[in-house]
Image (cartoon, rainbow, N blue to C red):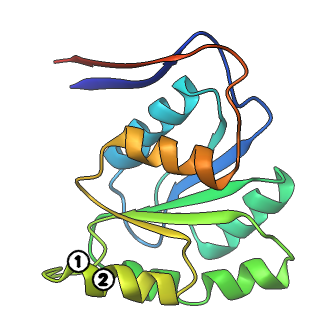
Amino acid sequence: MFITVGPIGGDTHMGQTVILGVIGSDAHVVGITIIEQALTAAGFDVENLGVQTSKAEFVSAAESHDAGAVLVSSLYGHARQDCRGLHEQFAEADCDAVTYIGGNLAVGQDDWSETERQFRELGFDRVFDAETDPSAVVAALERDLDTTVTETATDRVRVDS
């Protein structure tokens, strides 16, 4: 399945760099690939770090690209362990990027509100479950980065299977 989500009418967020990656030992790439396509279609500059990305790699990429946001993905259920200390490393690097996390974040994730609370306590600005529509992530990022659309844009969703 191929999903495209984004505005018609040109790049609207050029210059806003977003870092993506799958943290820890997780090798699930589908989620960040879909988010990368949605963000690119919306006009963001995307730096995809791929799978099995360390905390230090996220921080280094955010620094070197002067990123507005860092989006962390995890589907194997061990995100809390993998993300402990991440925001402390961002603070040490004086990096103030907006941080999101999404996916299947906890093994046996039954109470989403509890999972969301735990990741907010770890420092994430937004927490998304694995069922989140990519357009919701794009819309949240546009709000959080206070970006403005420079051309008339119409949202488009196309699914090819």
Q: Where does the image place residue 68, in percent across and percent down from the top left? A: 74, 53
Q: Quadrant of residue 108?
A: bottom left
Which residue is at the front of the view, 14 or 58? 14
Query: In the rendered structure, are the residues bearing label 2 and label 1 in contact, judged by CB atoms less than 8 Å apart?
Result: yes
Q: At numbered mark 1, what does the secondary structure look like: helix, strand or loop?
A: helix
- In the displayed structure image, the side of residue 53 where residue 79 appears, left or right: left
* Residue at image coords 76%, 53%: 67
**Residue type (three-letter) at the residue carrying disc 1:** Trp
Which residue is at the front of the view, 21 or 66? 66
* Residue at image coords 37%, 41%: 134
Category of crowding for the residue at label 1, using alpha-carbon neighbours closer than 10 angstroms: few (below 14), some (14–19), many (at least 20): some
Question: Residue beneath label 2, please?
Answer: 115
Question: Residue beneath label 1, please?
Answer: 112
Regarding residue 48, the answer to whether it shows in the image is no
Please tell me whether residue 154 is drawn above or below residue 101 in the rendered image. Answer: above
Which residue is at the front of the view, 12 or 154? 154
- In the displayed structure image, the side of residue 85 where residue 41 appears, left or right: left
Q: Quadrant of residue 160?
A: top left
Q: At numbered mark 2, what does the secondary structure look like: helix, strand or loop?
A: helix
